[in-house]
Image (cartoon, rainbow, N blue to C red):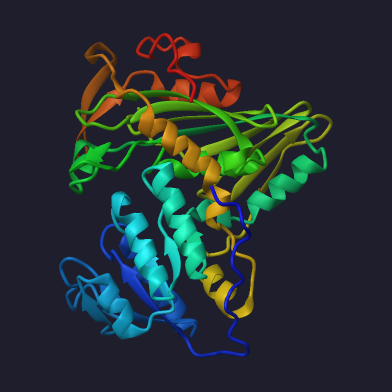
Amino acid sequence: MNTARTPLPVVLAGARTPLPVVLAGARGHGRSHLLNIRRLEERGLVRLAGVCELRPLDAAELDGIGDPEQSTDLEALLASTGARIAVLSTPIQTHTDMALAAARHGAHVLLEKPPAPSYAEFRRMTDGVEAAGVSCQIGFQSLGSHAVPAIRRLVEEGAIGELLGVGAAGAWVRDEAYFRRAPWAGRRRLDGADVVDGVLTNPLAHAVATALALSGSPRTEDVERVETELLRANAVESDDTSAVRVVTSAGLQVTVAATLCAEKPAEPYVLVHGSRGRITFWYRQDRVLVQRAGHGPVETEYGRTDLLENLVAHVTEGERLRVPPAETGAFMRVVEAVRTAPEPLEVPAAHWRAETGESGPRRVVEGVDALVEASADTLALFSELGAPWAPSPRAEAR
């Protein structure tokens, strides 16, 4: 990947005029962006100038938000509104083209994760954005947590001794309807294009990116190799129960075990292992537990910097960007390993059961909750933990 420095932001000295923003993808997860833009509008930081959706938002969806221009054509909308920022919450396979369209119009970009469905598309996006001279923020909200630099400082200061490795665990419950929420959901490819909508690369992508960040290995060059174990209990293309090990260029192991077929839902977390202690980070809650030799356990809740607010401050005041593309290069190495891995193995029917929850039928992989926790605790993959449904031998390292 091009490792040239990030372009300097365009600083509007003393500017107080709200920056015009266009939102592409305002339903589903995009709704959270719509509400966040409204929050920042109330603070006078931005103005929602346009919404790009295949079906226009109705009055109820825009209640309290105003009457932005609407179009199905992002480039036309960017041109007519003069948007300074584009927030892109569109299907994974559209990310690169949408980001480059925004860059051509001089708009800075907040791009939802994963940044792209392949490493080649990631490079095309990052090179194009850099050439256009605009800034890009990748939407890993967990990396806006003030806990991340605090944990890194603790590790660097030797609070838990020598850093031995980092594990992450994600046990989520998703019903079968989740995989029917959009044409690209649960797909590895769609109409010949890569999508890679797997548990590690989309719903629990934050676990992967956060674990890599806490290991001090967020960039492309920080990754030596990636090992994957991809499985699925649901009748979909993509993986819903998987484990990955990243061996960093410093020789550390970073593992993530994740499932959408948990017996019970649990808060995902990252576990930093040291020779004299450990740090647990529940990244959705900004909650940190430090346990170390000779000290009692200490739990702390941290604040968080909103990524759109940070992008606005970057553009107007030169504030450091929290999640530039270069800081997600290692995550994209994982995406690429998942993309190029063999098709996910089916979890044998003897090892999953059907249940009916509040929102409909779902599949549960028996014993997976304990295995996900054991992986974070031991830095082992499912096959190394003796999971009866895990692949053997382990998938080839990439």
Quarter-of-image position of residue 158:
top right
Front residue of this view, candidates 396 and 157 = 396
Q: With 277 as the anchor, is 301 left or right in this view?
A: left
Q: Determine whether 149 is above or below 88 in the image.
A: above
Q: Determine whether 290 is above or below 129 in the image.
A: above
Front residue of this view, candidates 281 and 355 = 281
Q: Is residue 186 visible?
A: no
Q: Residue at x 40, y 9 (%)?
A: 392
Front residue of this view, candidates 299 and 111 = 111
Q: Residue at x 62, y 79 (%)?
A: 317
Q: Position of residue 200 (x, y in %)?
A: 41, 36
Q: Determine whether 204 is above or below 124 in the image.
A: above
Q: Position of residue 320 (x, y in %)?
A: 64, 66
Q: Position of residue 398 (x, y in %)?
A: 48, 25
Quarter-of-image position of residue 357:
top left
Q: Residue at x 52, y 67 (%)?
A: 135
Q: With 322 as the anchor, is 258 left or right in this view?
A: left
Q: Position of residue 331 (x, y in %)?
A: 50, 41
Q: Determine whether 221 is above or below 381 in the image.
A: below
Q: Residue at x 26, y 14 (%)?
A: 348
Quarter-of-image position of residue 362:
top left
Figure disc tally: 0
Q: Is residue 352 visible?
A: yes
Q: With 242 as the anchor, is 268 left or right in this view?
A: right
